[in-house]
Amino acid sequence: MNSVDRITHALNFTETSKIPLDFGGHLITGIHYKAYENLISYLGLSSLPVEIERYRHQTARIDEQILTMFDIDTRPITPVWPDLVWEDTKTISRYTDEWGNVWKKNKEEGLYYELETSRFSSMPSIDELKKLPWPDFTKKRRIEGIKNRFKKIQELGKVPIVDLPLGLEMFDSGFYICGYSNYYMILALDPKAAEYIMDKQVDLQIEWWKQVIDELPDLKLIRIGDDLGSQNSTLIDPAMYRALVKPRHKRLFQAIKDYSKGRIKIIMHSDGAILPIIPDLIECGIDCLNPVQYTVDGIDPKYLKQEFGKDLVLWGGGIDTQSVLPTASPQEVRDEVRRQIDILAPGGGFVFSQVHIVQADVPPQNIVAMLEAVREY
């Protein structure tokens, strides 16, 4: 059974002789470049280049040699980075994105690019939002090179996943454009303005995915992201989600399914305590949930498997990256991987990946222990 077979079986809720394994197949299953530097040194492969795949999160492009070494089933197709305006000083690196938001990273101590300035410094009205020059995602350069990348992945016998361009998140984008406090105020006091932002983002996303689907007629898997949860609860009340956000998620996912004639399966990323709205996401049309952050309130893997395991592929939940992977011994890592597999793998509908990006402080021996344990168990 090869990689395509393993992922296909997982999507069809049937078991496989080997657990399907995703490491770096999309942004959230990737690895911070500092952890990657340590990993290639540990493996005796220091001559491999260290390239950044996603600027904001500072994730590394994982070399094919390492992906082959650990028999990884997935490969990423990362969108062309959009038009950014860069500004560097001796200590700070900054860029302005296409919506006018400014992101910065401290060159000495910073691990990621963090939001420094939102497009709007105060709560914008819907009229002000309508004057915002929204990006154009119909340009062919947006999909430059993805056909060749897709073909190479197919030739390797691996499973390609097309990732969402950063900035196109439907719900998250409002926080970046308006500022976090302002957007919460808009959601509560001026829902029409919030709906306008989300509708514009849905329109942009649909145009993007139509181009991708046209370019890649054999594509079957995509990843869409929208963070909907914190460590303790959903970011907004579930009733507000259902009133404002859910109809737009449903429109977006249905448009993708309709345009691809049902061919596309959607990996939906949201970490955090989102248990109350998981049934809503299923109703909206997602196929896989990532990253299955099983250490937060309500995300009990046994309950998830029992309650949703026949309707939702659990893509993640392999090992906690906040407390276990950075601090445990390699043997403890192996033990945790085995426990999670025992819970999530029976009956299929499970793809192993760690919970979110492998962070800079994770020891390389723990990364190796994680990947080896999946293939040994």
Image (spheres, rainbow, N blue to C red):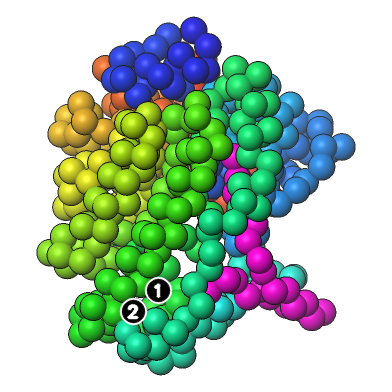
Residue that appears at 56% across and 78% down: 100
- 97 is within the stretch colored magenta: yes
Residue that carries the numbered disc 2 in the rendered image: 183
- Foreground pick, 176 / 142: 142
- Foreground pick, 52 / 123: 123
Q: Note whether residue 136 is visible.
A: yes
Indicate whether 144 appears above or below 244: above
Q: Note whether residue 360 is visible.
A: no
Is 46 left, or right, of 348 in this rendering? right
The amino acid pointed to by label 2 is Tyr
Indicate whether 244 appears above or below 63: below
Precedes in sequence: disc 1 or disc 2:
1
- Foreground pick, 197 / 105: 197
Check disc 2: other Cα within 10 Å, few if <14, some if 14-19, many if 20+. Answer: many
Residue that carries the numbered disc 1 in the rendered image: 175
User: What separation in Å lies between label 1 and label 2 (alpha carbons)?
Assistant: 5 Å
Q: Secondary structure at mark 1?
A: helix
- Foreground pick, 265 / 22: 265
Q: Quadrant of residue 289?
A: top left
- 56 is within the stretch colored magenta: no
Q: Position of residue 149 (x, y in %)?
A: 66, 34
Q: Position of residue 47 (x, y in %)?
A: 87, 37
The amino acid pointed to by label 1 is Phe
Residue that appears at 39% across and 12% down: 16
Residue that appears at 40% across and 74% down: 175
Q: Secondary structure at mark 2?
A: helix
Q: As drawn, which residue projects farthest toward the right?
A: 47
Which residue range is magenta in the image?
Answer: 77-99
Is 79 left, or right, of 183 in this rendering? right
Q: Position of residue 303 (x, y in %)?
A: 18, 36
Tag 1–tag 2 contact (CB < 8 Å): yes
